[in-house]
Amino acid sequence: MATLANVTLEPKRVSPNSPNVSLHLTYTLTPSTVEKQAGTVFREHIEILGEDGAVDPLLVALSDQTFPVSTTTASVARTRDRTVSKSIINEDPGVDTRASELGDELLAKVTVTYAANAPIPTPVIPPAFSAVVRGVWK
């Protein structure tokens, strides 16, 4: 079964006066020998969540993409970028007692499933998460 590792999420303000934030996400998938031999095609699903205790609300979902592996694939380094309005990831609206914008907490969840040539029996690949990233992205 493939493994997911090194999930990172880097939100950055597009420019000082821009209302947009660039979300840069990376992770690594390492396929099993069986998946390599089968030429497995994986489907990735990426969600950007707000970190709010027991329930982490979905803020952004990136469009699913597929990618294959082969016998020459040691691992697959994936990178995804998406620009969104800062208001979409502002999961803690408001200001503090000093009239400063409240910081937000974000994390990425990467889920990978089989799109084609899955091993039999087909295992469920556990999702992987980035660390929580805190900021206001000014």
Image: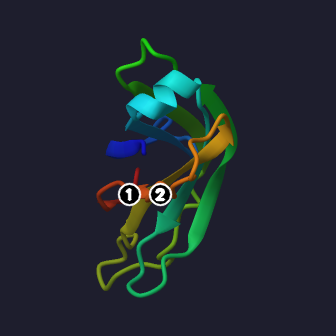
State the colouring used for the structure image.
rainbow
* Position above or below: 118 against 133: above
Considering depth in this image, is 93 or 7 the residue closer to the camera?
A: 7
- Residue pictured at 48% horizontal, 34% vertical: 15
Write down the residue under mark 2.
109
Considering depth in this image, is 95 or 89 the residue closer to the camera?
A: 89
Image position, residue 108 (x, y; %): 45, 55
Image quarter of residue 96: bottom left
Secondary structure of the residue carrying tag 2 is strand
* Position above or below: 25 against 131: above
Write down the residue under mark 1.
129
Q: Is residue 6 left or right of residue 52?
A: left
Classify the position of the N terminus by image quarter: top left
Label 1, residues with CA under 10 Å away: few <14, some 14-19, many ≥20: many
Considering depth in this image, is 84 or 138 the residue closer to the camera?
A: 84
Query: Amino acid type of disc 1?
Result: Phe
The residue most toward the front is 120
Q: In this view, does 36 lie to the left or right of 62?
A: left
Q: Mark 2 or mark 1, which is nearer the start of the sequence?
A: 2
Secondary structure of the residue carrying tag 1 is strand
- Residue pictured at 42% horizontal, 11% vertical: 72
- Residue pictured at 39% horizontal, 35% vertical: 32
- Residue pictured at 66% horizontal, 33% vertical: 66
Query: Amino acid type of disc 2?
Result: Lys
Q: In this view, does 95 lie to the left or right of 113?
A: left
Image position, residue 7 (x, y; %): 35, 45
* Position above or below: 89 against 122: below
- Could you tell me how many numbered marks the image carries? 2
Label 2, residues with CA under 10 Å away: few <14, some 14-19, many ≥20: some
Q: Are marks 1 and 2 in contact (CB under 8 Å)?
A: yes
Image quarter of residue 8: top left
Image position, residue 48 (x, y; %): 52, 58
